[in-house]
Image (cartoon, rainbow, N blue to C red):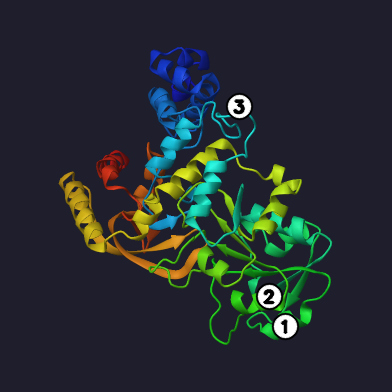
Amino acid sequence: MSGDPRRAIARTDTLLADPLLADAHRQVGPVLVKQAVRDAQQLARDGRIEPAAILYTALAALPVTPARLRRVINATGVVLHTNLGRAPLSVAAVEAVTAAAGYVDVEYDVATGARARRGRSTLEALRAAVPDAGDVHVVNNGAAALVLAATALAAGREIVVARSEMVEIGDGFRLHELLAATGARLREVGAANRVHLRDYADAVGPDTGFILKVHPSNYRIEGFTSSVGVAELAGLGVPVVADIGSGLLRPEPLLPDEPDAATWLRDGATIVTASGDKLLGGPQAGLLLGDRDMIETLRRHPIARALRVDKLTLAALEATLRRPVTPTATALHADPVELRERAGKLAARLVTSGIATTVTASDGVVGGGSAPGLTLPGWAVRLPAELAAPLRRGVPCVVGRVHDGHLLLDLRCVPPADDDTLIEAVERACS
């Protein structure tokens, strides 16, 4: 046992007192530092690192802020990557969030000194973005928008919905289960692949709360299919709640098959629901737009209080709406020629460092349950697949895509300002 390298592992209190960890104690606190040290000690006991590397391993594992969320460079080519937080906020939105971190007039009128409508400037920006809406409301995510509509308009009543639109959203949550939890009853119409206007008409009656139209934004049904548009449904004499899902407020030529809020409202939808952190490029939020009286009914319902958003979300959403040049829009419209040029420069620098690197075509996707089947032509740096794990564990974390035995670092979602950081991360991973 005298030669056992585990005897060289220093005591926890000795390691915690090392000056190398002094800044970490101040930045992230003693709890996270102690856990990182213990994790590194265990790696040494398991023989995965040398005892002398414990402190440096602990430091590398610590976050740079008190929160454990880590910054990630998204080199997957997926613009709205749900596991990576979907839409990254714009510079304007980040500035707005910082300003809103302290005391703000979120529901206070500085002119009169009286209470004011919560988030009124954000609501004004949303109305301005979608003039076809009589009024608007914001809740904490897209699912919450549907829950509020179902609870306020159809609790104890029926919601008529096509079987082909009974979607499953993220993490196994299913639309029919979500809506049934509100106390509404679902009246399914049509077949799995086809539904007709007469199916809806036959189902509508005195007990109908509303017709639900859902855009299947995370899958496609092809072949012998049919669906009914919002304009036809609006003629049946009952409210139509239409979920566009992706958060597209106006038509986008790049995404011709994605419905937008303005068009569906003009087609006669009573309420349109959408997500804020998808194609809009803002924070997580659920948007409700439509008939003024219906929106007021939703806003005044008791459950609306439980679904409301905080001041940080309101600030980020307003900034996104008023200054709509977002990282999401930039990534969607990235020029393939520019992406290839950047990939070539990165590859050349890595080859100079002795790293086997080539440039390859890479098709990106929208992601986030938006525009299924649409590919976004682009370019990537191709590296050995064994670099995927060390790049994920590095600081900053770099997440790429392993394909055909190689690691692809797709540059679509990587800001050009991060190119040097990406090269340094690859060089560290190789060393």
Q: Amino acid at mark 2?
A: Ala
Which residue in the protein does label 3 denote? Answer: 113
- The label on residue 199 is 1
Q: In the figure, is residue 75 to the left or right of 229?
A: left
Q: Amino acid at mark 1?
A: Asp
| Mark 3 neighbour class, 10 Å CA radius: few under 14, some 14 to 19, many 20 or more | few
Q: In the figure, is residue 51 to the left or right of 139?
A: left
Q: Position of residue 428 (x, y in %)?
A: 29, 38
| Residue 319 visible, this angle | yes
Q: Position of residue 138 (x, y in %)?
A: 60, 49
Residue pictured at 53% horizontal, 74% vertical: 220
User: Of residues 431 and 19, which is closer to you in this image?
Assistant: 19
| Mark 2 neighbour class, 10 Å CA radius: few under 14, some 14 to 19, many 20 or more | many
| Residue 229 visible, this angle | no
Q: Earlier in the sequence, mark 1 or mark 3?
A: 3
Q: Secondary structure at mark 1?
A: helix
